[in-house]
Image (tube, rainbow, N blue to C red):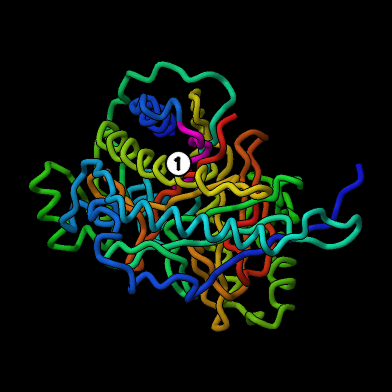
Amino acid sequence: MKTRPYFLLILFLAGCSKPHDAAPAAAAPTSWTRLPEQGGSTLYEEPSAEFTQSVQKTLNTSSLALEAASPEKPSAGKWHLGGMMANFGFSVSGIFGFIGAGGTTSLEVIWTRTLNHPAKHSAQALKIAPTLTDLELRDRLEPMIKVAAASGRIPDNDKVRSELFAKAQGFRKLCAALARVRAPSQFHPGELRLEVDIDAAGQVTPVIAAGGSVALRFDWDFADSPRITCAPQRRSTNPSPR
Amino acid sequence: MNGLSQDIAAAVARNPSLEGSPYVLKQVKLSLGISQGGNIGIATEDASILGTVEFDKADAPAEKQTATSGGNLRILSAQKSQDSAALTYAAANGISHDADSFMISHEKLRDGLARAVLIGDYFGKRAKGAESATWKIIEISPEFDLSIGGAMGLKTITGTAGIELTFGPKG
């Protein structure tokens, strides 16, 4: 099959919209962003017309910007914009807008050009059997640590090994527990994943939001026989390859 | 895990108004951990997360989701287990807890999920309205914090780990 080259634009913009400049009425209902123990309600509240207008305008603006940025028909063999991922957030007062670096994503949106195939990411994965002994698990992790260390952004030391091994052990324990249950329902567990960040000091932490350091990933696919996969990846902008 | 699958399906079935929505719930992603006592629970703090599980929607038609799973669901939150405001809220709402977890009924989680699905559906409708001549939104994923009582609120700059719902175009 002949494929066209394309690229995916991942957008983390500060200043495309200025949430704090918007009128207070454009805020989301308080209960949308505040938990009950923080004083929020558990009932569904309809947002104001002003809020809806601000959300629609933000999304429309992005679509129109994409339209303006892309040629009418991509030239064969040339790189062209095929998709965009944008992250939006809420300010403390509930105002919706693009998030800047360091902000917390509340809403991730992916656009694709209807002329293209959907843009996808993939990461190479190394399969690790769930029955691995601790020694074997360490051996399998070692190449990943070397690859990550080769980026020059994390140290290659005992602390990294020790912390990463502990996370891998915990993940393996969770896999073992989940392997005992199966869920016949319209929604079925498809994959168990853990992404960890390793910072310059060798600290290993689970990844929840986008970071700027190097990450490793553990996967376990429920559809296959229990297994763990592990893939190194650079965490520059995209938190979760698809 | 069986209970969680059923809770998600039940939360969707609880909102008949979603029938005509342009975007439908395709996936629910949540973080899991293991309590000090060795029980699996939903992890709400980064330090307790051992993995993130994805529940994918099957192509099969929706089932009747009326039965409620028995037993309680464990929400891991070591910090809130020491927080006086959270403990006061738990006492006032009959939520039992131990050193690192709060126990809620599946019914409460279904209530929380049902409301989160409505919030996601709201953004799905706006996504449909944002289509242009050659661009469309193929995925919209709101992320939520999970209350110790099962309710969910959109993540803000003060948010922690939680639950992500992914909506895609119907069909």
Left or right of residue B169, residue A140 in this image:
right
Residue at image point 51% right, 28% down: A182
**Residue at point 50% right, 45% down?**
B129
Q: Secondary structure at mark 1?
A: helix
Task: Give the chain letter at badge 1.
Answer: B
The main secondary structure of the magenta stretch is: strand
- Name the quadrant containing residue A158: bottom right
**Depicted A127 relative to depicted A203: above or below:** above
Q: Residue at x 29, y 33 (%)?
A: B106
Q: Is residue A82 left or right of residue B139?
A: right
As shown in the figure, which amino acid type bears the numbered disc 1? Lys
**Is-magenta flag for residue B95?**
no
Q: Residues within 10 Å of mark 1 (few under 14, many from 20)?
A: some
Q: Position of residue B21 (x, y in %)?
A: 46, 32
Q: Position of residue A83 (x, y in %)?
A: 68, 55
Quick one: quadrant of the N terminus of chain A?
A: top right
**Residue A35 placement (x, y as % from top left):** 24, 54
| Magenta-tinted stretch | B21-31
Which residue position holds label 1?
B125
- Height in image: A99 above or below A117? below
Of all residues shown, which one is farthest toward the top? B64
**Above/below status of A145 relative to A242:** below
